[in-house]
Image: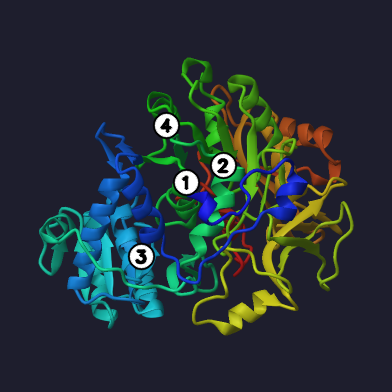
Amino acid sequence: MLERFIPKTSFSSYEDFSRNYRVDVPARFNFAWDVVDIIAAEDPSRIALVWCDEKGEEATFTFGQMRELSMKAAAFFLSLGIGKGDPVMLILKRRYEYWFCLLGLHRIGAVAIPATHLLTKKDIVYRNRAADVKAIVCVGDEKVLDNVDAAMPESPTLRHRIALNVKRKGWLDLQSEMARAQASLSRIQTESSDPSLLYFTSGTTGMPKMVQHDFAYPLGHIVTAKYWQNVQERGLHLTVADTGWAKAAWGKIYGQWLCGSGVFVYDYDRFVPSALLGVISRHKVTTFCAPPTMYRFFIKENLREYDFAALKYCTVAGEPLNPEVYAQFLDLTGLELREGYGQTEMTVAVAVFPWLEPKPGSMGLPSPGYDIDLVDDEGRSCDTGEKGQVVVRTDGRMPVGMFKGYYRDPELTARSWHDGMYRTGDVAWKDEDGYLWFVGRTDDVIKSSGYRIGPFEVESALIEHPAVLECAVTGVPDADRGAVVKATVVLAKGYTASHELATELQEHVKKTTAPYKYPRIVEFAAELPKTISGKIRRIEIRAKDGEEPSSNE
């Protein structure tokens, strides 16, 4: 499959990879017709998707079945009058029907809008109106159904409500409708540059941004899957992500299938470390990707009780990885954790690729095609060791898989993308080997008494203390210093919050990193606020402490 798009698939070093990797993007490309159907024709019994849930239900789908079921989904959508360019929102959590619907929408040239089930009525109304959503397909959860119904009167373009296993006035049942549909369809031609996906990224003071990707976007994830996640031929790859987020596109379909790996999906509502570890072991998952939060919980389990013989490669993304977590996971499993960095707007842009020696806590080196730089507030390139904003220089060629701008928002696009640079809003520094080290979002960086302090620096020091299960570091406004460092700490089993322990943690940070970085405030919490994808929501902690939220988060 890859030979059709990558002239050279074997590289001897990172330098060879960086210089010579390229993707041939056809003028007309459609992942459903040009990848799924070709695999289905050549090897219909090849495993595409293995699914199970926390209740013990399981299902497996071959590429032959995936072709047939997505054809039925496409025929059903067409019967509703949904066609090329029409936006359809998918609120399907980790249900396997997501794959049928996504591929079905690709087949007819429609625009899929993956979304989380946590959206409120207000959220849904905003998305419906901003993108002119024509139909919504969702899980049969009563709360989700109620919110969609409530949004209907304020959503002038919304014509169809579809759900799984639903018997409700005004709604269509997806399974019943697909059962009646024909599994045959003439190809609807799409250009590689046509819109295919639309993601709403998180907003705070501003409304969510609309990131639009085209039909060539899946080809950008060949690097993600083959050279970062290192997926295995006929293996099973598990990326922990809800389908409502772009991380699912990174790890649950495109690159994995292009590179010959099946996709494994564990459908759960509540993260239980032992349950997820058991699933990985029983189903012989070969490659795995998860946010650092999960690894922090994993190392508190008895990892030697699980059979990880099939597991060959582990990656981490979403937030920086603490070196202590890296070291403990390696000691307990023999597996290195390799970091990667990117955004909804792009594919993996920086990673610890197979030829590179991991430096725990570092994002690694740039992906081929991504001209990554660090710049100061005036747009000048930063020197080694100097902190600056991560930018993608786009004066030359555009990376395959990178977005072309924010949908229907030229002003926002111009603010983020000017002078030949797309500004990510993330701060990092570069070491003498060119490795990039994440500091934080531009608005996460704490400016205290003239010092610029990255939350990750302090969190890495704290996590080394055995009492700390996880933590979040934020800045609290201070009249004298501008801001002071605050640590919100979740304690490991066997430890009790106390003034003495808070002092002990402060002294630990002073000894582990530069003393000026120590948290002047230590607060203990039962849990940290997180997004559904596992990222810590520092904005909620900052808001509680009286800091105005940022529109960049």
Residue named by callout 3: 106
Residue highlighted by disc 2: 229
Q: Splitting the image into 4 quarters, where does residue 417 fall?
A: bottom right
Q: Which residue is mark 1?
A: 256
Rounded to the nearest angstrom, the CA distance separating label 1 from label 3 is 17 Å
Whether residue 459 is visible here, answered yes or no, is yes
Q: 108 or 443, which lies in front? A: 108
From the viewer's side, name the closer residue of 267 and 508: 267
Q: Are marks 1 and 3 in contact (CB under 8 Å)?
A: no
Query: Label 3, label 2: how many angstroms apart (C-alpha)?
Result: 25 Å
C-alpha separation, residue under disc 1 versus residue under disc 2: 9 Å
- Type of amino acid at the residue the image marks with label 2: Gln
Residue at the far top: name it: 305
As measured in the structure, the alpha-carbon distance from the residue carrying label 4 to the one carrying label 2 is 19 Å
Say which label, 1 or 4, has the lower sequence index: 1
Q: Nearer the viewer, mark 4 or mark 3?
A: 3
Q: Is residue 368 above or below residue 277?
A: below
Residue depicted at x 10% and y 67%: 169
Q: Secondary structure at mark 1?
A: helix
Q: Residue at x 16, y 54 (%)?
A: 175
**N-terminal-most mark, 4 or 2:** 2
Mark 1 crowd level (few <14, some 14–19, many ≥20, 10 Å Cα): many
Q: Amino acid at mark 1?
A: Gln
Asked whether, in this view, residue 402 is left or right of residue 112, the answer is right
Q: Secondary structure at mark 3?
A: helix
Kind of residue at disc 3: His
Q: Residues within 10 Å of mark 2 (few under 14, many from 20)?
A: many
| Vertical arrangement, residue 46 with respect to residue 3, above or below | above
Secondary structure of the residue carrying tag 2 is loop
Label 3 or label 2, whichever comes before in sequence order: 3
Q: Which residue is mark 4?
A: 276
